[in-house]
Amino acid sequence: MEGSKTFSWRVAITWLLGLLICGGLIWGGPLAKPAIADVPLSVAVNSNVEHPEAVDLEAADPEATDPEAADLEATDLEAIDLETENSVYSYRDRPSSDGIGKVYLGREIAKVMGYEGAGWLERGGRESQEKPSAAIASLNLRPDDVVVDIGAGTGYFSTRIAPKVPEGQVLAVDVQPEMVDILGWMKNEYQLSNLQPVLGNETDPHLPEGGVDVVIMVDVYHELAYPNEMMRKVVRALRPDGRVVVLEYRAENPFVLIKRLHKMSLRQLQKEMQTVGLKLAESPKILPQQHYAIFTFDKDAVEG
């Protein structure tokens, strides 16, 4: 009987230690991304801001970390086709907790991260968690390139790209006026004369036609309310040898603890880019959590 009690205590202690260790890995370790938090703009420089798109592990959507949710079909989303001006979209009768209910090619579009989450974009641990310097280096920019950063936010990427194109230009596009104000402040703070903040809208990034070498979108494509319209404008802005570089958290990896609709599979990205005449040129595995997908013109594609 005494041995049985000793065994029970050992099991209980082992279970408790395991729980504490797992808790440290999930909530305090390199994958720590707690539930959505509203961050006042006044604390936008706080490097400890929580990840606004992280899985809430206590009240998560049961599909949020489901590895089978990597490639979503319209039937999985229970989408209902409506007669709209653009038939490429359909709508759910009830949106997901982190979605807007609008479906594009089988994928429900995610809610936009508001400017209140600006502080998270400038967090101190971003380099160690996501390796953005490796992403920028892999762009292989020329000094005179014109680069567009769509969904630029606070300019984390834009301000680091601008010095690499001293004879070119960086167009930092965002649809939120508050973010564009921050971009203007960053431009002046770092004296980046070749950085141009641009206020776009949901269907038009306001780019010069045929004048762009590289377009980069970092964890933003999944939030575009009108991805088809937006990408057609992007394609028109590209030079013949232009590239579109898309970074998105990997939906295929269940250990990337980001809300389901804020991740994308490479297959879904390819499907959506093909509709606007772009093909996947390469997708080097250089980042720990994100796809790094490079798209170029598909000369054989017929634009729909």
Image (cartoon, helix red, strand yellow):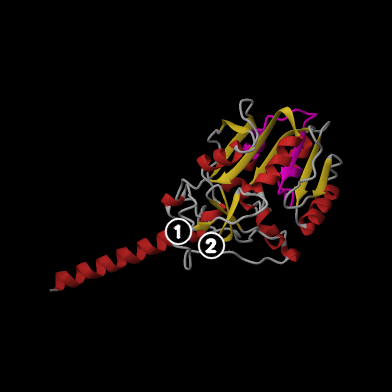
Label 2 with label 1: CB-CB less than 8 Å = yes
Estimate the x, y position of residue 247 in percent, counting from the top left.
Answer: 60, 43
* Magenta-highlighted residues: 133-159
Q: Quadrant of the C terminus?
A: top right
Please provide percent x and percent y for residue 232.
70, 40
Q: How many marks?
A: 2
Q: Which mark is residue 96?
A: 2
Please give the name of the residue rendered at 48% of the width and 49% of the height, measured from the top-left corner. Answer: 73
* Viewer-side residue, 89 vs 293: 89
Q: Which residue is mark 1?
A: 63
Quadrant assignment for the N terminus: bottom left
Helix or strand or loop: what does disc 1 sit on? loop
Query: Does residue 58 appear in the picture of this structure?
Result: yes
Q: Is residue 258 visible?
A: no
Amino acid type assigned to the residue bearing label 2 in the image: Ser
**Residue 61 falls within the magenta-colored stretch:** no
Q: Residues within 10 Å of mark 2 (few under 14, many from 20)?
A: some
> Real-space Cα distance between discs 2 and 1?
10 Å
Residue 217 image position (x, y, % from top left): 66, 43
Residue 220: percent from the left, percent from the top?
64, 49
The mark closer to the camera, 2 or 1, is: 2
Amino acid type at image mark 1: Glu
Residue furthest to the front: 83
Q: Is residue 270 above or below residue 77?
A: above
- The residue lying at 57 percent from left, 30 percent from top is 282
Magenta stretch: includes residue 137? yes
Image quadrant where residue 238 sits = top right
As drawn, 178 above or below 143 = below
Q: Residue at x 49, y 56 (%)?
A: 77
Q: Which one is in front, 63 or 56? A: 63
- Secondary structure of the residue carrying tag 2 is loop
